[in-house]
Image (tube, grey):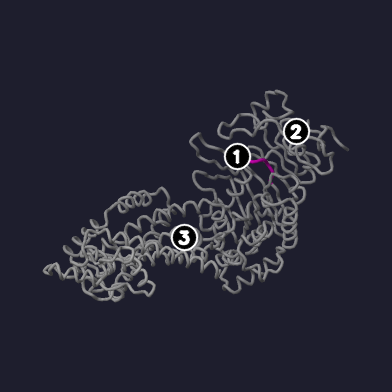
Amino acid sequence: MAETPLLEVRGLRTRFATEAGDVVAVDGVSFDVERGQRFGIVGESGSGKSATLWSLVGLVDPPGSVTADRVAFEGADMMAMDSEALRQLRGARIGFVMQDPLAALSPVFRVGEQIAETIRCHERVSRKDARARAIELLGSVGIPDPVSRVDDYPHELSGGMRQRVGIAIALSCNPSLVIADEPTTALDVTIQAQVLDVLYTLSEERGLAVLIVTHDLGVISRFADSVAVMYAGRIVEQGSVAQLLREPRHPYTEALLVSQPRLDTERRRELSAIPGAPPDLVRRISGCAFAPRCHRTNGRQQCLEEAPLLRRFGSDHLVACHFAEEGDGIAPTPEGRASR
Amino acid sequence: MGRIFLRRLGWMLLTLVLVATFTFFLTFLLPRDAARTIAGDKASEADIALVRANLGLDDPLIVQYGRYMGQLTRLDFGYSYVNREPVSEILKQRLPRTMALAFVAIVFQLVVGIGLGLATASRAGGVLDRTALSGAIVLISLPTFWLGLILLYVFAFRLELFPLGGADSASAIVLPAITLGIAGAAWYSRVVRQAATETMSTEFVQQLRAKGLPRRTILYKHVLRASMGPVLTMMAIDFGFFLGGAVLVESVYSWPGLGLSSYQAMQTGDTPLLMGCVLVGSAFVLVLNFAADLARAAIDPRVRLG
């Protein structure tokens, strides 16, 4: 029998009631995160990737509401848990790294205290021991001189250092899963790589699973093992990072790859952008959500009338496109043709 | 730090000099002859003229002003025109009463205001929140003397729970303190609610929830601390005003503090006592304002004193 996944998500659905009608931010998302796996979710703003994360840990407030066929963490049904049981999971078994570390850390408490209070609200630990663990954690996320840094306030640290503190908080109770919501978006490019490396190393060392959300395919290719591409609240393509970046089959994934700036192509090339804008999530269209922007649909009726389901290609490559076979399975180059 | 401290001290002294100057010339405008007050109703015109000459009230205004300011540099407030005691002695007797009243009122204000503010913020839009809003508007708008008389009538006269006035028993402080603090409590509850609601929609509270902190820890540790800034400043100003003597409340309850003194000094034309009360009150407002700035810097490390 196969081992049960660390996190099992089936049919996750998040809607927000607005005056204009219900906004379906997450529309039936299913995926598994295995123990020790680094799983990425990529998509543009409004694709529902962050809403997916917040839904999983029970932090979607009214007017938002979450339903799912099943969400299980370490075998336990999270949908059946009350708010207190979810609170005990958060911070203890599931760590959370936020997008903007300056906004996410309290400005008026020392960083050591912000780590220690996380430990002390989940475990019976003395103040002294919690502080000692905070210092140790600061060291393990690569903050130099943690013994004195532990008494710094967030505004006394650089952006990269702050995000390391954010990671230290997420790791403070030895979770088995860390959820990271655009953890590098607010940072300088050079710092982004360092922070990703810290997270990568810790995940390797501790067998820690990481569920990371980003709009940056560079982050995915650098960091993740598996990836799901989200568009308009649904997963449109999913597979191993190596496979998906090399052999994308969904036209949206292809378009994302082409619109990515690269250092190894000629500089004067204009970046290609995906024409059009993401759909209005209130007036959901009946067919494929990407059809209005898709270069592959060519006005075919099936794209406009029938929402495509995820279909399996190969061992674990899933694609939601009626004409996935028309993707040549070769990453497009900016000039529109295969490079190899 | 030391330089900032000295600079602030200099400003405070300058402000006090200005306050003394303004009050001096304002009290001079009072339609009252101090010499007549001192000499008494039955005194002859000759006696009054003698008193006037003795006190130097015939000197030009600017000379009198210079003399008064000179006294002040030696912390000499002069003698009361009415009972001839040194003003500083009267202030010394009255100040502890006013301090006690101010302290109890400020504590009442803080506890009720912050408690209600946090409670309404954590359930924004709920029944308590809506009731508290209209309640606060009513309480802030009520005239103090009217509220004082009503409380006095109901709780002291009708129910006989508290004495009718004075400061002879410990329970006597309850009604004046509530009267003094209730508008502030209502006002604080709105300010705290506003600040706390803003804080709760920020990312850092979302992070606290993601860390798994219990709701009460988030509210009473983090949201409270982040919302305290505006309250501290208001509290310092209020406390300063209360220490200067709450004229209306002290008069309604015959509370023998600075406020009652100023009121009586105003009625009898006792200029030195009135000036003394005003100067002590102003000094408290200034000092507590500075203290509030220090406290803000202590609570929020990003605040730098300037």
Task: State the CA–CA distance, disc 3 to disc 2.
Answer: 58 Å
**Residue A336 lies in quadrant:** top right
Task: State the CA–CA distance, disc 3 to disc 1.
Answer: 42 Å
Q: Residue at 51% x, 48% y: name it.
A: A61
Q: Is residue B95 magenta?
A: no
Nearer the observer, disc 3 or disc 1? 3
Classify residue A16 as left or right of residue B133.
Answer: right
Q: Residue at 17% x, 68% y: name it.
A: B48
Q: Identify residue for label 1.
A: A27
**In the drawing, what numbered circle is on residue B228?**
3
Rendered-image quadrant of the C terminus of chain B: bottom right
A317 relative to B168, above or below = above
Q: Position of residue B231 (x, y in %)?
A: 43, 59
Q: Position of residue A38 (x, y in %)?
A: 72, 53
Q: Which chain is indicated by disc 3?
A: B
Among the two numbered marks 1 and 2 on one chain, the one whose residue lies closer to the N terminus: 1
Q: Secondary structure at mark 1?
A: strand
Label 2, residues with CA under 10 Å away: few <14, some 14-19, many ≥20: some
The magenta span reads A41-46
Mark 3 and mark 2 in contact? Answer it, CB < 8 Å: no
Classify residue A30 as left or right of residue B46.
Answer: right
Q: Position of residue B203 (x, y in %)?
A: 56, 52
**In the drawing, what numbered circle is on residue B103?**
none
**In the drawing, what numbered circle is on residue A324?**
2
